[in-house]
Amino acid sequence: MKQVYLDYQSAKPVDPRVVEGMARYFTEDFGNPSSLHKVGDVATDALEESRKKIAKYINADEDEIIFTSGATEAINLGIMGYAFRNKTKGNHIIISEVEHISIHNIAKYLEREGFQISKVPVDQYGMVDVGKIEQRIRDETILISVGMASNEIGTVQPINEIGKLAAERGIAFHTDAVAAEALLPIDVRKDNINLMALSSNDFYGPRGVGVMYMQKRYRVNPMIIGGGQERGLRSGSEDIPGIVGMSLATEIVQKEMDSEVKRLQGYRDRMIKQVLEEVPDSHLNGHPTNRLASNAHFRFDGIEGESILLSFKDLGVSVSTGSACTSKTLEPSHTLIATGLLHEEAHGSLQLTSGRFNTDDDIDKALEAVPNVVSRLRKLSPIYKSK
Amino acid sequence: MKSTKYSEKVLDHFRNPRNVGTLEGDDVAVGKVGNPTCGDIMEVFIRIDGDTITDAKFRTFGCGSAIATTSMTTEMVKGMSLDEAMKLTRRDVAEELDGLPPIKMHCSNLAADALHEAIKSYRRRKGEEVPDDKKEVEEEIECLVGKDEFLSKGVYLTVKDPNDFKNKRTIVLYSGDESVDAAINLTEVTDRVILLTPDETLVISPELAERLSGSNVKVLYQSRLLEVLGEGEVEKAKIYNIDEDEKYDLYVDAILIIE
């Protein structure tokens, strides 16, 4: 059965043009940038050329780019590395309730290490209120971290205002930009971003590569100690094919994002309109307009998300849910709970995220499935009562 | 093991559940179990002739394994005596389904429990002594913490201006017809209104009940507001579910307490 893939938020295919561009760095130009011979020089050129391209794409300087093994490592380095480096200045960190789970877990770890964490609540659409961040700022606050957009419900955060506030108060501003990649322009200067995490895969590059952007005059403690690569901040021989792949991926995004976003927005708006119209007692999660072009996120009264996911699987459509029954902890999505939903409501959610290789037919197929899946499961449900 | 890595038998019962529905009659008993944290609610209906289960039906809100285990349970118990059915365990059901992912064993395999509840309620009805292992919930009235601190910072004692509630996630504490009326009216300014009552039903006039069921107000029964939380203004409410004996936080912006 041909699979319809509508889970781009979980993983993206690597663009074939990227794979093509990476190939020779596995076999021909395989050198180690630390080597001083010709083969090593070729690798150094590839590394620095890639760094330059990515820096240019986010409006940073090349010495502000640190390559890592992915976004999780970049987040660890950006938040934990910054916290430990600056703990003499203060021990208080502010994050939002709707950060990616990796940031919540880092916050938990930092609390055990003596840091204090304040979490900023969001409104019913998942949007952070800058005033609520301000209320939480203390003399000891050293870092504010708010993601550019929610990886789950797609709500876009007012990071320009948050960056401005942090700058005024002399507090470092970290943002996890992963969910926004290839969907929103990223400009670290314009938005006063001091630290930022990027993932290669979310630009349609290979997995296992990421970037921590760190503005000049900001400092972090390294998390990985070794041969001193990446100015000592991230030791370990550089993954040249992966890094080249990430830079090629950002180049494509730079050229094609505007038209791609328009196309995805069309899919999204069609999905939202049709599902809310056709399925009774269905609701949109996240912001009605201020949301990622790729993200349509619904909840249906009286049914459970894993059952929805399994039903779609049988129909050849790959989707995602915020239900507890699919998570490792058996807790429902913290993001949905933060928007004010009850557990039973958060359980019935369906996340459809589209991307570069989706077609109109894919959207049609998914939309055709939704009403049937929902009504079958509601017939089984003891708690669904139609109005 | 991946939590959705199900056996073919589980998937078959998920795709084609057996015995979906309800049963009615004097010879029918119902068992209901649920775990709201994990998100499963199951109802098992059995028809009993003398000492034998002659028919069984179910309804389930829950994940794939929850649906499959209740479906399988209803298949297994038909023809069993009540004593045999009382001995049916979660493990028996899981084995009959060729196993369940370990993470799903404890929470979604409640179907056997629902069956046992049904049998117990039947026996109780017949006047038999059945030990009640359900914990008696203490009915002590706990006082609400934080109400005064948040007055006019999200806690309101009356609706002076509906615009105070515009687009705010609002909890209304049930205190009679006036509170229900206020909750319904607030749906004109916000799409999230939750009516909280410690009781199992609302004692209100039929006209009001009809307006309520036609409105967007979400009613949370057997629920009590324990504490108002927030940084300077209302941000969260700590709620106690009496039935489940469970406390949880609900993110809200406003709380209306008409005394």
Image (spheres, rainbow, N blue to C red):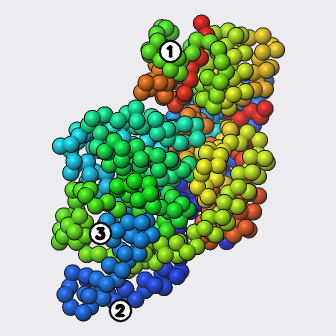
Q: Nearer the viewer, mark 1 or mark 3?
A: 3
- Residue B34 figure quarter: top right
| Residue matched to label 1 | B151
* In the foreground, A63 or A33: A63
Please tell me how crowded label 1 is: few (under 14), some (14-19), or many (20+) other residues with Cα within 10 Å.
Answer: some
Q: In this view, does A147 lie above or below B252?
A: below
Inspect this view and state whether residue B129 appears.
yes
Expressed as whole percent of the image width and height from the top left, the position of residue A231 reads 22, 69
Q: Is residue B205 above or below residue A136?
A: above
Residues at marks 1 and 2 on the same chain = no
Label 1: which secondary element: loop
Please tell me how crowded label 3 is: few (under 14), some (14-19), or many (20+) other residues with Cα within 10 Å.
Answer: some
| Residue matched to label 2 | A28
Amino acid type, residue under disc 3 in the picture: Asp
- In the shown orientation, is residue A65 left or right of residue B257? left
* In the foreground, A54 or A320: A54
Amino acid type, residue under disc 2 in the picture: Glu
Q: In this view, does B191 lie above or below A80?
A: above
Query: Which chain does the residue under circle 3 lie in?
Result: A
